[in-house]
Image (cartoon, coloured by chain):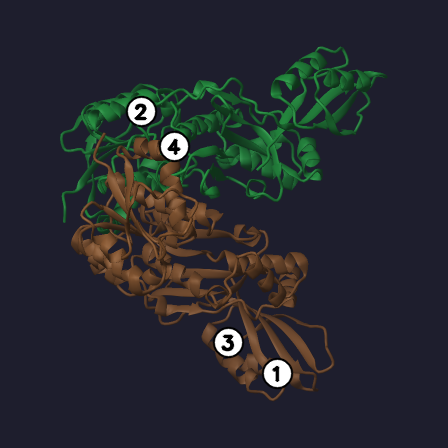
Chain colours: A green, B brown
Amino acid sequence: MNKPLRIAIAGLGTVGAGVVKMVQTHGELLARRAGRPIEIVAVSARSRGKDRGVDLGAYAWEDDPVALARRGDVDLLIEVMGGEDGPAKACCEAALSAGKHVVTANKAMLALHGQAMAELAESAGAALRFEAAVAGGIPIVKALTEGLAGNGISRVMGVMNGTCNYILTKMEATGESYGEVLKEAQALGYAEADPTVDVGGIDAAHKLSLLTATAFGTRVAFDKVEIEGIERITLQDIKNANDMGFKIKLLGVAQQNGDGIEQRMQPCLVPTASPLGQLEGVSNMVVVDGDFIGQTVYQGPGAGEGPTASAILGDIMDIARGLIIPAFGQPATGLARPDASSNGSDAAYYLRFSLTDAPGTLARLASLLGAHKVSINRMHQYGHDGKTAPLVIVTHSTPRAALNAALAEICALEASLAEPVALRIETL
Amino acid sequence: MNKPLRIAIAGLGTVGAGVVKMVQTHGELLARRAGRPIEIVAVSARSRGKDRGVDLGAYAWEDDPVALARRGDVDLLIEVMGGEDGPAKACCEAALSAGKHVVTANKAMLALHGQAMAELAESAGAALRFEAAVAGGIPIVKALTEGLAGNGISRVMGVMNGTCNYILTKMEATGESYGEVLKEAQALGYAEADPTVDVGGIDAAHKLSLLTATAFGTRVAFDKVEIEGIERITLQDIKNANDMGFKIKLLGVAQQNGDGIEQRMQPCLVPTASPLGQLEGVSNMVVVDGDFIGQTVYQGPGAGEGPTASAILGDIMDIARGLIIPAFGQPATGLARPDASSNGSDAAYYLRFSLTDAPGTLARLASLLGAHKVSINRMHQYGHDGKTAPLVIVTHSTPRAALNAALAEICALEASLAEPVALRIETL
């Protein structure tokens, strides 16, 4: 048997404890598969005394994750503390600087610092891997960087936040409002007390920015992701979409757009009969279009102890087997930014307006859309509640810029009671 | 830039030509991703003069694939000739014996000789890879051997033959008979002139035997796959299944069964609302259950030039990047046979009987089932055509052995006009 791969774990929350369990449960299997033992040698966390349901007695303890990363008996650091800066970043940098491999689940950190860290890893000849940071247990980073490595990728898209998908599918199933379902999700532990990062689309956008870099060979550019959350989606929107054969999903899309890669994380309408339309609950799904392979679809649990630990173990096994490739599948120093001149390629849109029920309002709205060459496919006015007249319009395919200009003018009308909701209809 | 990986291609049919196109189209991208150029140096096929739509002028030509495999300027042989023995096997063995890596799409060859070839590869320190042999473009071998390598796998199952899925979904969509749709599939090139290997489940069983070895770390044991084709499925079966909330799929299943791994490739009923139930046309899908990750699903094109070439390129890229792992993810010499005492864990079954419309027949049938403790959940008699009375029964969960014993006795009844159809209802 070859030399063991000696690992250290920084962070012993759910995920860190999951990794310990997995290594303890499958030690023999892992060694057979990797051709060498996987050995945990040291761990670090905030509180040493806490019971985590795993026996840590055989491992050295470090209070300081940076000291953990620098230990001479460690080949690979697993960072599962979280936090985009601070100790997480410090211990990853310390490990990479010392030529040690890093496996992390930290999407926020990589969304902001991934490019610099990838360069650091390369210059040190170390691996930086992050399968667990995107779509939980689904081995999608591996599929993009390795399995599909012969393809030019034209689009990668998917549902990458289980909390949002749970809320949207639960609203539909129960007829409850966004607020009610969010409260339940918080009680079940699916959503944080401050849900902004999830429902605002930021967590999913972190993941999308990593997928974009991986799929297209570009620098991580979280700042270029157009982000919109699901907070304004109503039950009526979900029903309207349903009536037209669509589901509403918080959908991340990165696609070739002439001069660059557009990145969008926003609620979209997708066909009910499509795999994305069928996705229920907290599952994640990623759909990839490649020039030779065509379309492939990957579905699985997007979070949780087991799935996240599984993704981390996948990365560990690769490193144990000697696969050391650039973090984003290509040398980081050569990567360009994915700048696209716009984040909105042409699409049809679902629009919902809240208007005063005054004569002439509809005509004015229609003429403003027409003035910007936004052409109307279907229109539906429903449920007056005395004061407001909600109006739904589905457009033909239109440039986003034209739509935005029309919406700005409509929004400025006296008859407009709230900012219009505009949801892209995504063709699959 | 590092030394190029020099490849030779044995076989220039659709897939071989696809690999040439991919390398020619994406040469620069491949080099950037692999850290070294991928160079085709020589090719071999039956007829040198044939126009294959690709420029082969820059490559050496060999009439003999074994000579191709032995060339001193070749690091890796791509075998895409097909045929379970003969020149395909000879050239793969020649390459491996000479320490050269082999990438093959040849499921029939590996189903029969995979174990011996994996051992040969290991003793030579060469890689033997076969992503293209299972589920076309879907990187499922990679997912099992690498991405999910930290998990114990309890079940892997899926739809692995696009021809059969096309026929079954087309029958349902058009109301045409099995024979009519098969003829259309042959005209479209989806089915061979002799369709036995596809519709008889043999091609899919080849693939399943490779997935089993990969998922469970067992020897390839094609002879242990219980195989049943789709030839006896009628439109009425499809309709009956539909009425009960199921679809009929040619489903391959390999699962832990107490003392071993059971392997089945047979038409099954799966829930309409499940990913497998939703799968239409020639697509393939594989569903994997792991102990830590839970369930993941992989969907994509199961055949064709682009998808198959894509899978081959994925394997080439791994080898170019230095990933040399055992063919089935664990050292071949240590693998045990996946022998299970039975191929049928307990399940509910859909049964269709063709009986003479004589008094007492139904009572005799029911009592024979009862005598073997096969308990009836639902029963439906339909469409007398004067002479025969088709009868459909859905059982409660039952051991396959008990069911088989009952069916044998029922089959021996004078009133029985044809062998009963028994389709397992697969829980997902």
**Vertical comparison of A26 with A340: above or below:** below
Mark 3–mark 2 Cα distance, whole angstroms, equals: 60 Å
Mark 4 chain: A
Which residue is tagged 4? A133
- Res. B381 visible in picture: yes
Tag of residue A332:
2
Mark 1 or mark 4, which is nearer to you? 1
Residue A387 sits in quarter: top right
Q: Residue furthest bottom?
A: B414
Which residue is tagged 3? B403
Q: Are marks 1 and 4 on the same chain?
A: no
What is the secondary structure assignment of the residue under circle 3? helix
Estimate the x, y position of residue A57 in percent, counting from the top left: 20, 40
Mark 4–mark 3 Cα distance, whole angstroms, equals: 48 Å
Q: Out of B132 and A266, give the one closest to the viewer.
A: B132
Q: Are marks 4 and 2 in contact (CB under 8 Å)?
A: no
Mark 1–mark 2 Cα distance, whole angstroms, equals: 70 Å
Which residue is tagged 1? B417
